[in-house]
Image: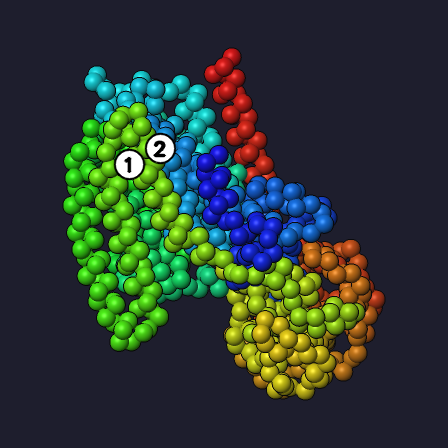
Amino acid sequence: MFLGLLCAAFFWRIWTPSAIDRASFAAGDFSGQFYASAVYQSERFWQGQLPLWNPYVYSGHPFLADVQSASFYPPRWITILLAGPGGFTYFALEMEAIAHVFLAGAFTFAFAWRVLKDRLAALVAAIVFAFGGYLTSYPILQLAILETVTWLPLLLLLVDIAFTAARARPALSTKSPTEPPAGGRWSGEAEGSRSAASVGAGLVMAIALLAGHPQTALHMAYLALLYGVWRAYSQRTGWREAAARFAVLGLIGLGASAAQWLPSLEFMRLSTRSELGYDALAGGFALRDTVQMLLPGTTGAWSPLYVGLVPLLLAVSAMLSHAKRLAFFWLAIALSAFVLSLGGSTFLYNLLYQWVPGFNLFRSQERAAGIMSFALAIAAGIGFAALRTQDSPRLTGLMRRTLGWLVAGLVLLAAVLFALWQVTGAPDVTTALDRTVFAAFLALASIGWLNLPQSPPSAGRRLWPMLLLALIVFDLFTINWQTDLERRPPEAQTTFPGLLAQVRADPDLARVDGRDALDGNWGDLTRVHSVNGVSPLVMHTYARLRDTLPKEREWQLLSVKYVVDQADGLSVPAEAIARDAWEGHSLTLFRLSASTPRAWVVHRAHVVDEGAALAALADQSFDVSSEALVSQPVPLSAASAISSSARVSIYEPERIVIDVEAAADGLLVLSELDYPGWHATVDGRAVPVLRANAALRAVVVPAGSHRVEMSFAPASVTLGLALSIGSWLAGSLALVLLARHRWG
């Protein structure tokens, strides 16, 4: 309940009914990618369809295979159901994000309470993780990160149950929970509970994988492995038993999420991501960003390394408590994750890149800060709990001395920054000065708190920790509460220029190039077929057309008829048919004088490799309307002057029907990107789908009148769904049987 009230207070500008005070999550990935995808997903959901393909972005995109679409993520289904069939609103997705911040805090509280046996200490850990600089920075806007890492504390809670015998564990105040009682091993949890926890951990891992950020899920999996090994060693669990529990967790986790990761793995291998090497993947925080651990906001708009001044001090001081082993584990995790978040700036990532599976697949290593934030939150909880035990006298003495030196250093730094500000007046210096003064205030307030009397016991000892809790909340809320907010209502995030109405009114299946004028997956929101898009995964065939060929040739191959631009004219013949003002820019809608239909028939084909095809297509003398470049021989005559026609009669996301009139044997070429899983029939007879012109789909058609149908049904989706359904059924059945065995 308390965490819910804190969430309501932290995000009050999102839900307030006051129009003048309303704000929304800032434009960018949240609006342009995640909201747009959720709108498309919701529409297909209410139509009773599984969104396999998206025709509105990137000239066609494997929607379900895009891991960040979260097509099978259960909380997204709940949001879609609550939003109803009338339309998925921006506010609905905002509330989904806020709900995950609450869940992250609630799960952290549950895990910390089990480990620390102290409610207030668990609450400190929950507040630090939920409202610290990491979760309240870019993970909210890059929603897949937030929705994945939310499940980390619940995963660790179940791993703890699977490997730790909690019943005989003493309280934190008497002995470290990592040390078994005299006589050896803990008296165990019921075997059924431990087995059920292993199954449950696998299902939670699957939910995290379905949330759409595999890099964060990878970090979670390795942390769960390390924590499980540490707990198993502490409990003297046999290696066979430990291996069996990990095997159950891994098999259930991978199996139950196979519906997502199998298609996504296939897509990744065919995307530009497969071409990235060490230099592209090794990015992380700059070393100067580490100052944000004390002075947030000084090197960037976000402060993902900031967990609060007092929580950071509590975390470090936890090493002097009686729970040294527990504190050491979490501080070691925090330090390792911090070093990893620096990417190639240190040598750690080099080792992981070469020797640890998975770390050579993802860029932006700064996302390891999520693990650091959680580990420091747990360590802060340990330090807070220790202050309320026999550790208190020496810890408070250490904190007084540390805070005294910190105040002196901050005052000196403030004096230097003030002098620089007087000379330069630079905004960066002003920000640094403001943060330094705020940090000094927090340190002085903490010193004042440490000197408060704790008697009489009935009042002082209850008030003393609550005051520190209030100081932590004040610190984190002050720094983080407006980080992701934009001072405009959510409706403003989903409006687009009115000139696109003319495109929607065009009966032709024409595509639009928004170039740099329109941001994000705007095609999903306007129902206009766009060649633009935003996604971490982009088909390499499309990217090579876009990056290699002249713009005019790209437009021809992708059937672009309209262009939206901020310029007054284009380099090719085009007519300006509408103008509009949008987002502070003046936009013009151009209709190209010549455009290619979605389907056409050629009667000549040349066999070339992809490189030669791109080189030939770059030559403007090559006529794509009469000949095609293919990767395998096609039995056609050389009658280039023969006239044939093709007309798209049905166009649906996963189904296209084309009526063809071929004067001779020919090759039907579609202005649609080739991708595994597209199947074709000619008059009901299955035929192979060929690749033409380096990226497009094509089908051989004999002379005469024919109906060609293309449908999208990837084998990776079918296999993934079968594995997921089987794993969820097996996991659920195992939980039911274990529960019956325990209670029956």
Image x and y of residue 83, in percent: 66, 46
Report whether 434 appears left or right of 410.
right
Residue at mark 2: 120
- Residue under the image location 65 percent in, 67 percent down: 496
Decide which of 627, 500 is in the foreground and name it. 500
Image x and y of residue 374, in percent: 36, 43
Image quarter of residue 606: bottom right
For numbered disc 1, what is the local secondary structure? helix
Image x and y of residue 55, in percent: 66, 61
Determine crowd level at label 1: few under 14, some 14-19, many 20+ residues with C-alpha closer than 10 A.
Answer: many
Q: Specify how the rendered protein is coloured.
A: rainbow
Asked whether the residues under the numbered discs 2 and 1 touch, taking CB atoms below 8 Å apart as contact, a structural biologist would say yes
Determine crowd level at label 2: few under 14, some 14-19, many 20+ residues with C-alpha closer than 10 A.
Answer: many
Which circle marks residue 358 in the picture?
none
Q: Which residue lies most toward the top here?
A: 744
Report whether 507 appears left or right of 20.
right
Tell which circle, 2 or 1, labels the residue nearer the N-terminal end. 2
| Residue 92 appears in the figure | yes
- Residue under the image location 26 percent in, 54 percent down: 440
- Residue under the image location 61 percent in, 44 percent down: 79
Residue at mark 1: 384
Report whether 607 appears left or right of 403.
right
For numbered disc 2, what is the local secondary structure? helix
| Residue 179 appears in the figure | no
